[in-house]
């Protein structure tokens, strides 16, 4: 049976053009870890990624010991994502990385329930007792109306792409909507450990509303 690859099946969510476009993002299930600080220097951010992948692969590989949940199907673990914000700030300011607050997250298949989440958590605690799982949570998130594009290049060059989104919104009758629960959103399609910075692919998504 062919594995479901969310990046390929839902190209409108994971493979946008480098030119801005509009997308309506439905409810999805995530595992998420909240934190704060500069991701380049903050150990908390690195730990959050380790936790999310440990949990995600525990769920994916549950079939190996016949503990897979009801409705289980073969799939590719979706990419790491991040919601980013700063207190009392519209959007984000890249020169203030120490002020970042973030929600690191990985999408989960539709069969993942809170019970599946708790079972995976117990399993990871046994296998990797050094990980602090107190902050990982099960999250349903509906992003709604957004504009997005594919940013190709270093993370520090993202303001260039963000400017394109701002111009697109203004020219097409939208206003960016960083209201409660709506954030600057990044989806990481490249591994920075294996990919040159100028070739990194990152989906950048901003919430909007009609003017």
Image (tube, rainbow, N blue to C red):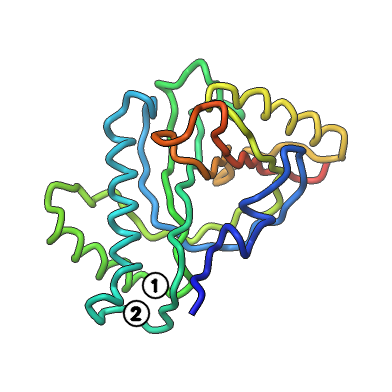
Q: CA distance from mark 2 to mark 1?
A: 9 Å
Relative to residue 172, is residue 87 depicted above or below?
Answer: above
Q: Which residue is mark 2?
A: 69
Mark 1 neighbour density, 10 Å: few (under 14) some (14–19) many (20 or more): some
Residue 9's spot in the image, x, y percent?
62, 65
Q: From the image, tell me which residue sits under label 1.
A: 113
- The mark closer to the camera, 2 or 1, is 2
Quarter assignment of residue 172: top right
Q: Give the residue displayed 62% in from the left and 33% down from the top.
A: 152
Side (left or right) of 44 relative to 22: left
> In front here: 85 or 66?
66
Q: Is residue 42 above or below residue 1?
A: above
Image location of residue 80, percent across then percent down:
45, 47
How many dots with numbers? 2
Q: In the image, is 163 to the left or to the right of 58?
A: right
**In the image: residue 100, left or right of residue 124:** right
* Residue 17 percent coordinates (x, y): 73, 43
Q: Quadrant of residue 179?
A: top right
Q: Earlier in the sequence, mark 2 or mark 1?
A: 2
Name the one closer to the observer, 15 or 123.
Answer: 15
Query: Could you say whether the residue bearing mark 1 is in a helix, strand or loop?
Result: loop
Badge 2 density bin: few <14, some 14–19, many ≥20, Cα 10 Å: some
Residue 134 location (% of width, % of height): 23, 51
Residue drawn at 37 percent across, 25 percent down: 40
Q: Are marks 2 and 1 in contact (CB under 8 Å)?
A: yes
């Amino acid at each position: 049976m062919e594995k479901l690859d969310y990046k390929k099946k839902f190209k409108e969510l994971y493979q946008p053009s480098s030119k801005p476009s509009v997308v309506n993002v439905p409810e999805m299930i995530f595992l998420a870890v909240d934190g704060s600080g500069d991701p380049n220097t903050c150990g908390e951010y690195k730990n959050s990624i380790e936790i999310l992948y440990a949990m995600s692969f525990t769920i994916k590989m549950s079939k190996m010991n016949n503990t897979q949940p009801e409705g289980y199907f073969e799939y590719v673990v979706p990419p790491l994502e991040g919601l980013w914000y700063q207190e009392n700030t519209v959007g984000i300011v890249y020169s203030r990385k120490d002020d970042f607050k973030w929600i690191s997250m990985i999408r989960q298949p539709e069969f993942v329930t809170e019970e599946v989440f708790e079972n995976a958590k117990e399993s990871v605690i046994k296998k990797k007792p050094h990980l602090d799982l107190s902050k990982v949570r099960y999250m349903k998130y509906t992003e709604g109306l957004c504009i997005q594009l594919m940013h190709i290049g270093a993370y520090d060059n993202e303001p260039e792409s963000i400017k394109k989104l701002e111009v697109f919104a203004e020219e097409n009758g939208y206003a960016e909507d960083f209201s409660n629960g709506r954030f600057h959103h990044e989806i990481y399609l490249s591994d920075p450990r294996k990919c040159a910075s100028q070739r990194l692919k990152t989906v950048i998504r901003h919430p909007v509303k009609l003017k």
